[in-house]
Each structure stands twice: as C-alpha cells, then as structure tokens.
Amino acid sequence: MELAQIFQAIEETRFLTQLSSQERLFFVGNAAPLAYIKDFFAQHQKNNYNYYYDLSAHPVEGLKETDFSLYQGIVVVSLENEASLLATINQQLDSIVHPIVLQLFADILINLLCDRPLLKTTPQQNQKPKQSYAILTTPRSGSTYLCDLLNSTAIAGHPMEHLRLATQELARHCNFNYLKLLDNLMEYRTTSNGVFGTKLISHFLFELQRVTPDSKNLWQSIDQFILLIRKDKIAQAVSLVLAQKTEVWHLHSDAKKNSYQAQLESLKIDRSLLNDVEQKVLFIEQQEARLKKTLATHQIQPLVVVYEDILDDAPRQIDRILDFLKIARSEEQVMQITSGIKRMPSTISQKIIRQYQESKSMVHL
C-alpha cells in the first residue's frame, strides 16, 4: 500500500488534523513520511514551527548537536518499526537534555483515540475495566443504532467501532500493535461505573486476526460478547449497496435525510445493481457464519441480539443486554434510552428488494 493511502486511511480519525494544532514539534524519521506530514501541516497551519529531521539525509548521531529547547516534543516517525527507531533515538539522546520522545502511532494516535492529551507517552501497563464487552456483527446490521442506545444509558460504556480501517491498515502495513490500543481504550473509554464497550465489524476483525499472530489475546481480554444479527439479509445487503454507492452510512438530521433521498432518486435499478445485492447477501451470510464459528472455536457463548427485535422494543432489548452483562441499575435512575440516528428506509430500497426477489423467483421457475 502506498504511503499516501496509509495516511488517508488513518485520517478517518482526523489524526493529522488534530496533531497539526500542536506547534514546535521535532519530527525524526525517513524522508517519505516526513515529507507527507510536512505537506499536510502546511495546508492546516499558518506558521510551521516544526522541524523535520530526515535520517536518510542526516546521521542519527547528529541529534546530539540539536538545541531541543525550541521544541515541546520529539516525534518518532516510522512506517516499518516505530519501537526499533524509538530505541535508537532514545539511545542517542540519553546523555543530553531533551523534551518528551513520542511514537507517532503507538503514543500520539492512541492518545487521540482514547481522548487523552496528545503529547504523552502511553502507559506500559493498563488497568482493566470492571466489565468489558464487544458487539460482534456484520456491516449494516443496525449496530450503530444499538451502540447509540447503549451509550444513552450512561452505564454501558461508550460502544463504538474503535478498531476499523485506520487500525487495520496500520496493523497490516506498519507493525501496529492494535492490542495495545485496545488495552488503553479499555482503561480510558469507560463510563463512571467502570464499563467498557466496543464494536467489532466482521471484515475488520478477520483482517486483524490475519495480520496479527497473537490475535487470540483479543478474545481473552474482553469479558463478554454480543452477537448482533439482522434477520432480513436482503434488506441488509441493499442497505450496504446503497451506502457504498452514496457514501452515506448514517443520518443524524432531517436535512441530511432529504439530501440522501435526492441521491437515491438518481440511482438506476438494473441487472448490475441486483447482482451487487446478490453478492452482498452471500458476503453477509458468510461473514455471519464465520463469526459464529470463531466464537465456537474460542468456546464463547454470546448473547444473540436481533436487529428487528430492537426496532420492535428497544428498551426490552437494552434490558436483556444489561442483564447479560450484569450491569447494576440504580432504582432511582430512570434511563432515557434514545438515539440520534435516523432510520434510512426508502422507497428505492423497497423497489430494489422487490425486484431482487422477483429476479430470484424467475430463476427458480
């Protein structure tokens, strides 16, 4: 994968955008990633008081001659092995006064995702939460809606998709330890009662397992698992197709809902689109089966939650989940179970479903 593609994947977290708000940073690493960061910052900073020390052009020993009093932090930049380069830099700086030394991804990115101050080293040992859980599911299963409902209880953690594209690409190409990220999230992204929640979408999960040999630790780190399924696989597949075509994945306002409807009206229902739906149905079924097999392999009995049941009676399903997780509720506390997510059914989605079903019926005649 090209360097620009890696950084673009990471920027879904607004990582470099957030880091550009910091001034007087001393970046040290190889030419290509340093040049990318410098160009990015030039578009987001009026004045650039950073320094970019290119190790392909200057010897690492030259760091000893640097006046680091001008900088608030040293940032180690390596797409191959941050930990190795960090050790080399620390060895060179051992005998001189210098500011904090941080890894671009293993420290600063993790801090961002954990809502911690950016320019701090991440802890080597993390405190486990009192209770942790993960929602396992396939794309377009209603998981964002469920996470919104659980978050609104204020006692079920802040479940969201923490490990996704940025984590996947860093693990795949840059030797990124996503389990360290998970450990930090589990300490710093809990509700006041010590509960941590996260969401793992199947294809991201399986890619992380593929590129990380010790992925079994993921299953040992988390206490409980919830398997969210959607019964209507055709509707789920159509939702996935429409999201990919419109690049609209969730709606949070009526204004955006109107704009989304306008995008849908321009779509043409043809054989290519119906074939895409069929492929997505197969993909979802295969991913769900693989999730069930993975859970069985690790001897995990999840709580199975059905999306359609949430639509029918959300409070009852949230109660089921809280009971399963053994999360205590105060008798005085009245939970307001709400979500800002707008439902996305549309006339065109119903047309696609109907035409898809008709095409399948014709095949079986």
Image (cartoon, grey):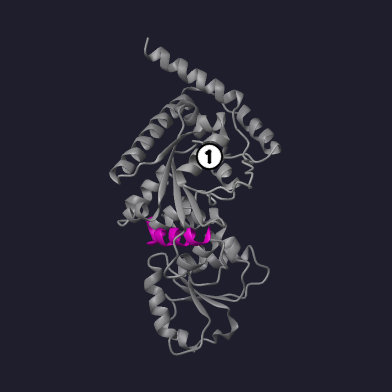
Q: Residue at x 55, y 87 (%)?
A: 67
Let me know if residue 59 appears in the view: no
Residue at the spot of label 1: 319
Quarter of the figure with the N terminus = bottom left
Say if 227 sits above or below 125 in the image.
Answer: above
Q: Residue furthest front?
A: 331
Q: Main secondary structure of the magenta part?
A: helix
SS state under label 1: helix
Q: Nearer the viewer, residue 184 or 40?
A: 184
> Relative to 123, is 279 above or below?
above
Image location (x, y in percent) of residue 240 = 50, 34
Residue 114 visible in the current orientation: yes
Which x, y percent locates residue 106? 45, 66
185 within the magenta span = yes
Crowd class of label 1 (few under 14; some 14 to 19; many from 20; radius 10 Å): some
Front in this rendered view, residue 302 or 136: 302
Horizontal side of residue 334 vs 184, given as left or right: right
- When the figure is inspected, residue 71 is found, relative to residue 280, above or below; the finding is below
**In x, y percent, where is residue 119?**
55, 71
Residue found at the far right of this picture: 255
Which of the image's four quarters has the C terminus?
top left
Q: Image point 59% across, 40% down: which residue? A: 250
Magenta segment: 172-189
For this view, does 135 lie left or right of residue 20? left
Residue closer to the observer: 202 or 359: 202
| Picture residue at 56% right of the left edge, 68% below the top | 118
212 is within the stretch colored magenta: no
The amino acid pointed to by label 1 is Asp
